[in-house]
Amino acid sequence: MRCLMVFDNLNDIVFMKCDTKFCQHIRKIGITQDLIKPTENENENCERIDSDLILQIFSPMVTSQRIMNCHFSNRYTSMQCQNGTNIVFDEYLGHLFIYISDKEVSWQQKVLSVSILFIKRICGSDVSLLKYSRRRRFLVSKLLDVWLKRSSEEQCVLIEAVEQLTVSAELSTAALKAAKTAAEKMKTKSAFSRVHVLIMVRQKFLTLYSSRNATDLTAGDTLFLALLAEAIQSVDSEPKDKSDLDVIIVEKDDSLQLENNIPLPRNKINSLLILLGQNGLKLNAVHLSYITDGVPLFIIHEIGNDVFNSSVIDSLTSFCTIQEIQIRGTIDREALKIAYDTVDSSMKKIIDLFKKKNAPFAPTRSVLAIITTLATRWEPLKKKYIEYFKNNDSSSLIAIESSNMNIICSLKDLHHHCMLNESLIDNYTKEAVSEASAMVAVMLRDYTSFFEVKAMNNFTMRSRSTLNINKYLEEFPGLVHFIYVDRMSHRMIAPGLEFASQETLELTKKKVWSMIDFSRQHLRDGHFIVLWKDNTFTYSYFLWFEDQSGTSLKPRVQPTASELFPGILNGDYYEKLIEQCFPRMAKGKVRCFELFCVHLGLATASCVLEHSRRLSATVWEVTGRPSNLLDLF
């Protein structure tokens, strides 16, 4: 049983995604409380649920959470029911997120964190788009499905790293040349010069070419795009008979079986405006096509004016912060002043950009009307805030609240018309993307059969394709599996879990996933080396730091327990860890690495440590990228 719900500040449902078991459970509660009447087919799977029933059952909980947060600054993080069901809470831009399941609380918190990330990238700073945009609503839903499924199957998705496809130098050069040619075509045929061309093989990284002035595409972006490619196929195959305003998505129990999705035709290009980036999200147009089955080609270019886009996002975010501060019993005047200053600066940039016909793009009449309304509403509101900060009269804030809502509505209109609006991608751009995609397909057509094989099997512990790999693996007797990650580039090398016996595969996979989960718990507690065993295997986990010359570094500050989840999808956890462990070191001076190992149960601790040292020093023989020695002590 699982359910994700999103409520706005009026406690209305903006988005809800659940399975049929949850629907049946809610109907039973509704019947028990005389909220609804039973039907003749009550025992059959429920594929619909009334939003009024959801509101009646969950409104007391949502209201209680709001009161605990606003008046006591002590909101709930989770609840547990008598039957073992866990309810987890989180908030983003004034919206309350609730996830209900029978899984562990830490896992449900991770699901909520990833869900909010997907909404940030798909909807920007306007969560209400989930309510009004059918395509974006279903895209968020399918992204969550894809992530849940792939994190239970793909090692790179589970540990949030980018797996480098192991290919020959000839193919690597050919792929990079094709990507560069496509980027040059985009620069000459369209008005966009900040271009990325990315080629993946399923969730594995093949090549990336970025134009010189383009903002870096992070590893988190790459992993997100791999999930997005699979989700878009599912969205396009959704039935069109559902209402655009039906915010409740009920998935059947087999909803995570995604293999039967019909792939996009190779000549079809799917375009979408989303936000990419790590420290600051930027608006990008993503054009997706397929070179062959399982090999997506992404042509990505930044779109719009950076100053305008960031100002709209900052204004919406800061206004939500202001609302949260103002509804509390005790006003945090300092926090309110910081949020107001951000709004004031952002609003000035937005309005000034459209003065004296100096707009960053050709605005339509509706956009000009929104800008005029925004300027008209902001000036009197600005004076009220200046008066409040001068006199410190909290009663004056009551009159400001309604004005805040009006400006937020205008900013959301601007967000919709000038940012997340697919009509911003003109026909010239679509034509350039089509030509660039066709060029890449032609340049790599001789390798398509190889891609299809590689998509299924990159490198396995049983691989004997080359003498080097054979010799490399024979040097580690007792080693069952390993995962090595360079946390500066977030590139991962790991054998595939390929075994002759299905029973052996299931057992080993279950053990590996359990090992990763266990090590992640200890990493969040500040433990960098963990060694343990069960009746079958011996497990080890190592995280260490090096300087640029490869010399081992010991943390200057011992990290404390963290609420963040190790990974890169929702911000770079390892970058923050380095900042915490080396507070005065310049960025980029410290490198971070991870190594997971599974040995047979008979392996001794000294054997595990010796293998770990040699693995970290020689794994470049498989990846083709040199590494440095791991100093465990």
Image: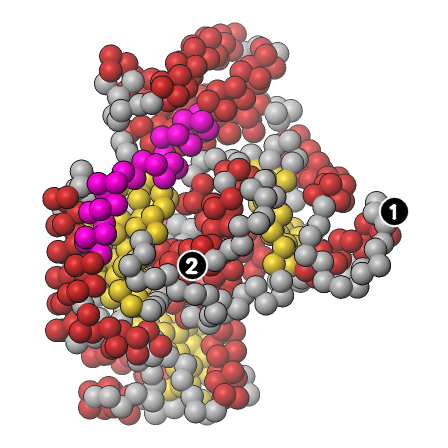
Secondary structure category for the residue under label 2: helix
- Give the x, y percent position of residue 257: 53, 68
Q: Is residue 21 magenta?
A: no
**Whole-number angstrom distance, CA of label 1 to CA of label 2:** 42 Å
- How many neighbours does mark 1 have within 10 angstroms: few (below 14), some (14-19), or many (20 or more)? few
Q: Which mark is residue 94?
A: none
- How many neighbours does mark 2 have within 10 angstroms: few (below 14), some (14-19), or many (20 or more)? some
Side of 369 relative to 522 (left or right)? left
Residue at x 19%, y 70% (from the top left corner): 445
Mark 2 residue type? Gln
Give the camera-side residue of 247 and 61.
247
Q: Is residue 415 magenta?
A: yes
- Give the x, y percent position of residue 297: 27, 59
- Give the x, y percent position of residue 40: 84, 59
- Which quadrant of the figure has residue 174? bottom left
Residue at x 73%, y 41% (from the top left corner): 52
- Which quadrant of the figure has residue 228? bottom left
List the single residue furthest toward the front.
Answer: 241
Q: Can residue 406 be seen at all in this image of the molecule?
A: yes
Give the camera-side residue of 81 and 580.
81
Mark 1 residue type? Asp
Q: Can residue 279 be seen at all in this image of the molecule?
A: no
Residue corresponding to mark 2 = 233
Residue at x 45%, y 55% (from the top left corner): 236
Which image quarter is the C terminus in?
A: bottom left
Give the camera-side residue of 269 and 18.
269
Residue at x 68%, y 56% (from the top left corner): 47
Magenta-drawn segment: 411-437
Residue corresponding to mark 1 = 34
Whether residue 521 is situated above or below residue 26 in the rendered picture: below
Dot 1 or dot 2: first in sequence order is 1
